[in-house]
Image (cartoon, rainbow, N blue to C red):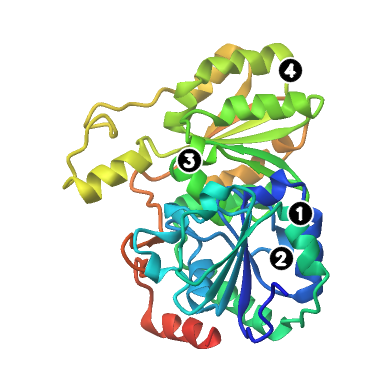
Amino acid sequence: MIFHLTSKKPILVVGNGVRSAEAKKLLLEFAEKTSIPVLTTMNGVDLIQDELRIGFIGVYGNRAANMIVNSADLVIAVGARLGLRQVGNAKAFFAPNARLIRADIDQYELSRSIKEDEEKYLIDAAKFLQELLGEEIPRYDAWKRRCFAVKELLAETDQEPGNLCIRKIAELLPPDPVIAVDVGQNLCWSAQSFSLKGQRGRILIGGGYGSMGCALPFAIGASIAESKGTVYCVTGDGGLQMNIQELQVVVREQLPIKILVLNNHVLGKISEIQQFSYDCRYAQTTRESGYTVPDFRRIAEAYGIRAVSVDSFMELENYRAWLSDKTPCLIDICLEEDSRLIPKVNWNSNQILPEIDAMLQKKAEELLM
């Protein structure tokens, strides 16, 4: 028996290993059968979408998801390496009230312990989920409702312009879209706020590869793999400049790639580090310190791609047709330069920053008790 029947507040944490094992169908079957809440890592953020989605865990994870991990009494991690980005620097603060069960196909990942008493299974994710499905596990409807109540309660917290922009984009996309995302702030905003319609959509990210500028090449490859299918490319002003010449491939192959540039005119993730860790000593990340942004609309048009610059993501509604036809396009979306990436879990604790209204925090904690 793998599952602990004494558990009152179990959760499943799944990573990209579940997709590698072609086990998403088994995951959804388990979630429907048991009503156990499913959280993801950033790399596996598209494994659970639509009405089943709560969010992903980790340093830049959704506040509700991290609070649920802190309150759970059983964490079953499947195909999720639980690296530093998920666990933090002080392992004792990860899921402090929970027993931990880990299933991974990589023995070297399992050789690194998170908890002294954790249970480890060196096993393929699909086989592990099949074994779980064969066990008599009670339904956890009430616990799941409380988790989703916390998600709803905190829905309007931590909503920076980047998050609101991604929410607007998600609203305009068809069911089961294919999305390629760059690295940096736009990646974290996408992982936090993309709630896709349907369960077959894909969010293609670099993960640990972390190569700035990857979104456009990813989108090109995905479109070709889907017989010139529509792909949505979410990138930043810095990332796009890394591989901007690939616009010619989009034109030459007439790939219906929709390029959405989250343009805050700074190298956002790096400038945040310079702001908070180096006393605002900026270097080549802001306009004043040597970083500048070209007119992406004019560049795209020079390549032969229709393009537009908008002053607000609310204007995206006017270009709904652009996002649904079979012609490539570029939409340059202006964001405030000081758009932040929040929330952030303190590296040495499980404290989630910035702090929110005390009454709201207390109500969320009471729901998870």
Residue 19, percent across and down? 71, 47
Q: Which mark is residue 189?
A: none
SS of the residue under disc 4: loop
The answer to whether the residue labelled 4 contacts the one labelled 3, judged by CB atoms less than 8 Å apart, is no
Q: Which residue is identified by label 4?
A: 254
Residue 221, percent across and down? 68, 25
- Eye-nearest disc, 1 or 4: 1
Could you tell whether 322 is left or right of 308 in the image? right
Q: Which residue is identified by label 1?
A: 126
Q: Residues within 10 Å of mark 1 (few under 14, many from 20)?
A: many
Q: Which residue is identified by label 2?
A: 52
SS of the residue under disc 2: helix
Could you tell whether 79 is left or right of 176 in the image? left
Q: Amino acid at mark 4?
A: Gln
Q: Is residue 341 above or below residue 271?
A: below
Q: Which residue is identified by label 3?
A: 311
Q: Residue at x 81, y 68 (%)?
A: 133
